[in-house]
Amino acid sequence: MKHWLVFLALMLGVSGVRADFFKADSDPGAALPADRVYPAGRIFPFGGFSPPAGANLRKLGFSLAGPVYGGNERMKEFARKQAEAGMPVIWQLEVVYRGQPMTIKRFDEMAKTKETIDWAEMDRAMETAVREALDAAGGNIAYWAATPEELRHWRKDEMEYLGRFAAIIRKLDPEKRPVWMYIPGHYNQASLEHYTPVLDVLAQGYYPRAGTTPRVWCRYWAENLADAAAAAGNKNLIVGVVPEMYVQPREEELAMVPVWVRHDVFMPLIYGARFVEVFSLAQRSGFSAHGEYFFAYCQAAKTLTAPGGLGEVLLFGERQNDLKLTVESGPAEVDYVRKDKAGTVTFAKKYPTLAWADIRHVSGRYLFAGSSADVAVKARLSGLPEVPVAVFDAETGKELGRTADGGLNLEFAPYEIKILRFAPQTETGKEKE
């Protein structure tokens, strides 16, 4: 009898490990509607500036449309067409003050001539713009975007303007949809922190300029955004990324575009980003790689926006610290280096070659992992339960192998992103159609 009790205790212990390790008990997003974009719903927000027709965009995986440039009237027409296609929009709101739209150039001119802004009049101009947008698009707005973009935190009037802009939207928008402003990519953490008290979405340009910049720079951007958000202490602040689609690669680099795009989308998500907005989906002269980039972003979008898919894991999963990757062959670290025009190093930092997110969700246990090296790397994953575990490709559902010793050998190609799901060995894999 004693031996049976010991055996039963061991079995219960294994079952407890399985239930606790492999799946979360609850889904924080369970009550949100499945047909609306986060944070109003469960759909991962994945959009792009100046997109093609909305119906095609939705079929290709995108969940947001826009914004577009050209002022409020162009936004109204754009939003009308997107509504017909069932695509929610990011509304880029133009404020017309004393007959002229507010732009960075106008702020510069006003500062030069020492023109004093009548803030009561500016508030009325902002209220007019918001009401017109709500009348034109109403429920089809998912996010607000401020214009002018890149308002400078060291300019008092510009930050006053941004604060009033956000406050008026929150006052007039019955759904209190998130407010965002595009921030340039050269801003560091300290600069980003100036915007966290005002904005609901913190997202900046994330432009490695095709193959001219080492992709470890993406780690620097992702880290700054994550750290600025953490310093704000606002759990509702949405960190986002604006990856590039406008720089023409060299001919010999074209085959790398899908690899770059996948890396540039998923690396910031590993760091905690929950919003992707591509700049830009527009056709432009001198950019013949548009198709390669566009369809690579479509593939990433489909991975994240499919109902019940990996976007929901990233949005609503619990971040864990059980799993660890150790490089066994190849560089264990990569260098982030900035130089001035004379070639002098102005900033340098080392990053671990591999970055990963260990996430537990009601649908299973996941590992999102990526390499910042331009050469292959072999690594050992540790921290799995020492019970029989099945390993799946989380995107296709295909079973990749099994392990029972708590570890797994992995090999990363240059800049590769892997997304794995772990389950008790009793589960069998079936590749998704």
Image (cartoon, helix red, strand yellow):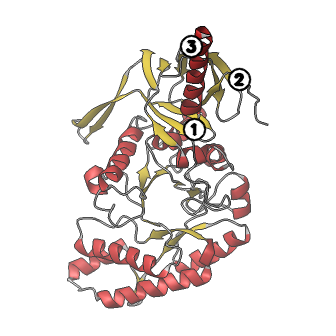
Q: Residues under labels 2 and 1: Cα distance? A: 38 Å
Q: Which residue type carries mark 2?
A: Thr
* Three-letter amino acid code of the residue under disc 3: Val
Would you say 121 lies left or right of 23 here?
A: left
Q: Disc 3 or 2, which lies upstream in sequence?
A: 3
Q: Secondary structure at mark 2?
A: loop
Task: Say which of marks 3 and 1 sits in front.
Answer: 3
Residue 391 on image: x %, y %? 63, 24
Using the image as rendered, state which of residue 329 and residue 12 is in the foreground: 12
SS at badge 3: helix
Name the residue nearer the viewer: 78 or 390. 390
Residue annotated with mark 2: 426
Identify the disc placed on residue 257.
1
Point out the tag, 3 or 1, that comes first from the N-terminus: 3
Residue name at image x 58 percent, y 57 percent? 47
Per the rendering, the mark at residue 391 is: none
Residue 326, image x and y in percent?
42, 19
Kindly give the residue lying farthest to the right in the view shown: 433
The image quarter containing residue 292 is top right
Tell me which residue sits at (61%, 49%) in the image: 290
What is the crowding at mark 1: few (fewer than 14 residues within 10 Å), some, or many (at least 20)? many
Query: How many angstroms separate mark 3 from mark 2 (CA)?
Result: 23 Å
Disc 3 to disc 1: CB gap under 8 Å: no
Q: Indicate which disc, 2 or 1, sits on the residue closer to the N terminus.
A: 1
Q: Quadrant of residue 427?
A: top right
List the residue tagged with mark 3: 6
From the viewer's side, name the closer residue of 1 and 257: 1
Do we see residue 428 in this rendering?
yes
